[in-house]
Image (spheres, rainbow, N blue to C red):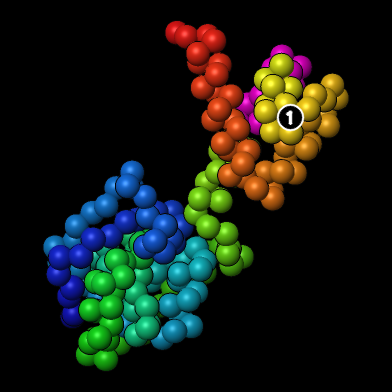
């Protein structure tokens, strides 16, 4: 069995490239972690979709390990049944060092099932997280009781007044699809203003 020593990993529910890591993420230092080589097709399936690893096909049952296709590396965290819980990319320099000797890593016939196919997502982590934040924010707004907040937000975004609350809500939803960063920033501004106006 091949091992890699002293690398950092950032396990998330979805795979994010190293350049999308955040300072608030819980980075772990793996002192010693097994690595297995598999074919490129299997590697991409496991990277892109929700999968369940047949743990009997692993040389050793580790809950955290690395997989490589010979061209890329991914860290996996699995449960006792083999369900992939989280994934991690590697720091570029560390991945590059490992891949230099990828031909020396033993190849295994890893068995797995795709439990849920996922569409390839080309949106950035920031785009996805801000869109999710905005959608949750709008879900928690009562169109009738919080009408003034929506009108305030609309004015802050478009610099004009709008009386039709349904149009306000719809316009904000549409803008979120195109530019969640702009809507997110305006919501943050509104929240700051509200905290100033209504301090605890």
Which residue is found at the position 50% from the left and 13% from the top? 196
Tell me if residue 37 comes above or below residue 177 in the rendering. Answer: below
**105 sits to left or right of 110:** left
Residue of label 1 = 159
Mark 1: give few (<14), some (14-19) or many (20+) Cα within 10 Å.
Answer: few
Nearest to the observer: residue 8 or residue 106:
8
Which residue is found at the position 62% from the left and 45% from the top? 180
Tell me if residue 59 comes above or below residue 6 in the rendering. Answer: below
**194 sits to left or right of 1:** right
Nearest to the observer: residue 48 or residue 125:
125
Nearest to the observer: residue 52 or residue 167:
167
Residue 94 visible in image = yes
**78 sits to left or right of 169:** left
The C terminus - image quarter: top left
Q: Residues in magenta?
A: 137-147
Residue 58 visible in image = no
Which residue is found at the position 61% from the left and 41% from the top? 182
Q: Position of residue 192 (x, y in %)?
A: 51, 22
């Amino acid at each position: 069995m091949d091992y890699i020593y002293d690398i950092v990993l950032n396990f998330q529910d979805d795979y994010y490239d190293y350049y999308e890591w955040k300072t608030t993420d819980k980075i772990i230092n793996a002192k010693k972690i097994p690595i297995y080589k598999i074919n490129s097709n299997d590697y991409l399936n496991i990277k892109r979709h929700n999968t369940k690893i047949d743990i009997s096909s692993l040389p050793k049952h580790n809950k955290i390990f690395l997989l490589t296709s010979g061209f890329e590396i991914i860290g996996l965290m699995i449960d006792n049944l083999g369900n992939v819980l989280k994934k991690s990319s590697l720091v570029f320099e560390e991945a590059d060092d490992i891949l230099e000797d990828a031909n020396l890593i033993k190849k295994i016939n890893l068995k797995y099932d795709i439990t849920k196919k996922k569409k390839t997502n080309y949106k950035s982590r920031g785009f996805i997280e801000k869109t999710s934040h905005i959608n949750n924010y709008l879900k928690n707004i009562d169109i009738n009781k919080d009408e003034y907040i929506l009108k305030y937000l609309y004015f802050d975004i478009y610099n004009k007044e709008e009386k039709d609350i349904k149009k306000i809500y719809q316009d904000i939803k549409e803008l979120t699809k195109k530019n969640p960063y702009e809507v997110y920033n305006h919501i943050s501004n509104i929240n700051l203003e509200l905290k100033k106006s209504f301090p605890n």
